[in-house]
Amino acid sequence: MPIFTGWQGAIPLGEREEERDTAVKEAEPKKIAKSVETAKGTIEIENYCSPEKLESMSIDDGICMFSRHDPERQKRALITVSKSDGGNVIVGAHGSKIVSYIGIHKPSERERWGKPNYPWLFELGAIEVSRNYRRLGLAEAMLKVAFDDPYYEDKIVLTTGFTWHWDLEETGLTKYQYHDLGAQLMGRYGFIEMATDEPNVAMDSANLFLVRVGKNVPFSRYQKFASLLFANEWEAMLRGW
């Protein structure tokens, strides 16, 4: 798994650190909505779903993997994300019912990714499609809406996939098959696997750690992010950080 693959538009290393971080003009968040026709009917996909709208919606009982089979608990979590600084909830709705979602937010201060409080670093914290609405292309449709937004092109977005959150029973996949499926799906939207010694990621070799480096990210931001990948000084030194 690489820790650097390069990208177009990197700002030269000779510039001062603060200039590198501010040289790219930040895009405004872009509201996007699209309709997806499925065998279950029309599903409306929308980003930046407001707390008020989420509050007014019901949530499908097949939303269960992150909430310990308590959909209302997950709805409350989505409302919290939508109210947070930089929070973005992407929802798939069947009528007024939430049937799928993605939550993007700032990393928690309790995690190594959140401790520096970088304003350009985000976490895709969860993606889920209800058991009752799977195999309709909703995960891909939500990811397209999420990353058609130019706001993320000068940002770094990370996501983790832990085996204990995966619905292996319903899918019939092994954890390694699920790993490959997740990596392929996210890879269509610019995410690549990266190596890290973060303990939760390292706990299971099938766990996923994926990173999306926007096309306008200055190299100085990548350097700062890469310095977080390894807490072990020897490992970091061996990998050039």
Image: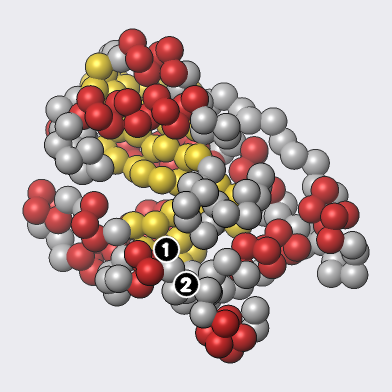
Q: Residues within 10 Å of mark 1 (few under 14, many from 20)?
A: many
Up-down: is 188 above or below 195?
Answer: above
- Specify the label residue 137 is tagged with: none
* Viewer-closest of 237 and 207: 237
Is the C-beta separation of discs 2 and 1 under 8 Å? yes
Q: Quadrant of the C terminus?
A: bottom right
Q: Horizontally, is 114 left or right of 203 in the view?
A: right
Q: Position of residue 51 (x, y in %)?
A: 44, 18
| Residue neighbourhood size for the residue with mark 2, other residues' Cα within 10 Å, grouped as few (<14), some (14–19), many (≥20) | many
- Could you tell which of marks 2 and 1 lies nearer the N-terminus? 2
Say which residue label 1 marks.
Answer: 209
Residue 184 visible? The answer is no
Q: Is residue 166 left or right of residue 239?
A: left
From the viewer's perspective, is the residue at label 2 or at label 1 nearer? 2
Q: Name the element at disc 1.
A: strand
**Quick check: 164 above or below 80?**
below
- Label 2 to label 1: alpha-carbon separation: 8 Å
Q: Residue at x 56, y 38 (%)?
A: 148
- Report the residue marked by disc 2: 196
| Residue 235 on image: x %, y % | 53, 84
In terms of image quadrants, where is residue 161? Answer: bottom left
Here the colouring is secondary structure
**Residue 26 located left or right of residue 162:** right
Most extreme residue toward the right is 15
Which residue lies most toward the front here? 110
Q: Mark 2 belongs to which amino acid?
A: Thr
Q: What amino acid type should be assigned to the residue bearing mark 1? A: Phe
Residue visible at 70% across and 55% down in the picture: 217
